[in-house]
Structure formats: C-alpha cells, structure tokens
Image (cartoon, rainbow, N blue to C red):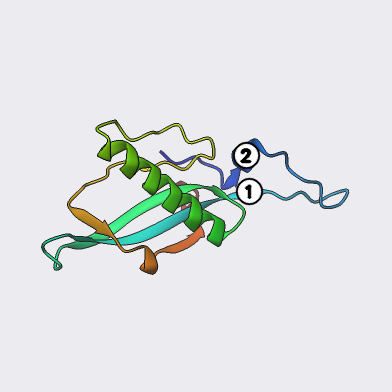
Amino acid sequence: MFKSSSACRPHNGEMLRVVNAVARDVMRRYEVDVPIHHATDQDRRGHHVFNGCAAGPGEALAAAHSAYDRAVQYVSAGLPAPDDASNGWAARGLRSDWVLDWHKATAKAWVNPNSLM
C-alpha cells in the first residue's frame, strides 16, 4: 500500500519544473488523517487515513477530499470505488455508516515506518 520512498512522480502527469540548474520541484508523499465517527453512535470514533503525492499539505488535503468525494459518488451509484486515480489518491474501505470530519483533518509529510529501524 505504501511506497518505500517519500519522493513522488509529478502530480497529474505534470513535468517537474527546473527551479535552477541544481534544484527541482519534487512532489512528496503525504498522509492525510481524517477523524471519523459512527453516524448513530457518536462514542464510536476513529481515523480514516489517505496517502498520496502532493506539493504541500493543502494540496494533499484537497486531493484526499476529492478522492473521497469521487469514491462516494461511485458507491452511491452501485459501482465499486475507483482505485485508478491519475494523481495517486484513491479512497478504499468506505463505510456508509461512518462520517468523516473533514474540518478536523490534518496533513503531514509521510514517513516510511520501515526506514525508522
């Protein structure tokens, strides 16, 4: 599910821009944590975690929200949630009886837990 590198390919197929002769604008892998609660039992809580490539935390949050909205549209129409997002963001494990609290969502650069050992 996770890639071993925090560097990413260009978002939506865009070419990396050369900032100067040495540096490049590199996409990073981000994790977006969205608090969730059960629709009828507010005491049941958790987090839904998204990950993908983005230029910054704001773009990561927008991409995760877009992937979620797209998946909900498909599932509501009786179709399986798409997992072929061109930007690498997709939503899996959706549960119709859980509500995502997007106003409390956080985005941070993803750290590969395998690289910490």
Residue at point 47%, 61% (across, down): 107
Identify the residue position indicated by label 2 in the image.
Answer: 9
Give the mark nearest the N terminus, 1 or 2: 2
Secondary element type, mark 2: loop
Spot occupied by residue 56 in the image (x, y as percentages of width and height)? 59, 58
What residue appears at the point 60 percent right and 39 percent down from the top-left corner?
12
Q: Nearer the viewer, residue 89 or 116?
A: 89
The amino acid marked with disc number 1 is: Met
Element carrying mark 1: strand
**How far from the left and from the top, in percent, is residue 36?**
26, 60
The image quadrant where one finds the N terminus is top left
Residue placed most toward the observer, 115 or 78:
78
Do tag 1 and tag 2 residues touch (Cβ < 8 Å)? yes
Q: Residue at x 82, y 52 (%)?
A: 19
Is residue 38 shown left or right of residue 106?
left
Q: Residue furthest right?
A: 21
- Give the answer, above or below, for where 51 lies relative to 42: above
Snapshot quadrant of residue 100: bottom left
In the image: residue 62, left or right of residue 102:
right
Give the total of numbered labels. 2
Nearest to the observer: residue 106 or residue 74: 74
Q: Which mark is residue 69?
A: none
Residue picked out by circle 1: 27
Expressed as whole percent of the image width and height from the top left, the position of residue 75 reads 28, 38
Q: Position of residue 92 (x, y in %)?
A: 32, 41
Instruction: Classify mark 1: residues with Cα within 10 Å, few (<14), some (14-19) or many (20+).
Output: some
The amino acid type, in three-letter code, at marker 2 is Arg
Q: Is residue 111 visible?
A: no
> Image check: 10 left or right of 44?
right
Disc 2 packing (10 Å; few <14; some 14–19; many ≥20): some
Please name whichever residue, 7 or 88, is drawn nearer the observer in this view of the structure. Answer: 88
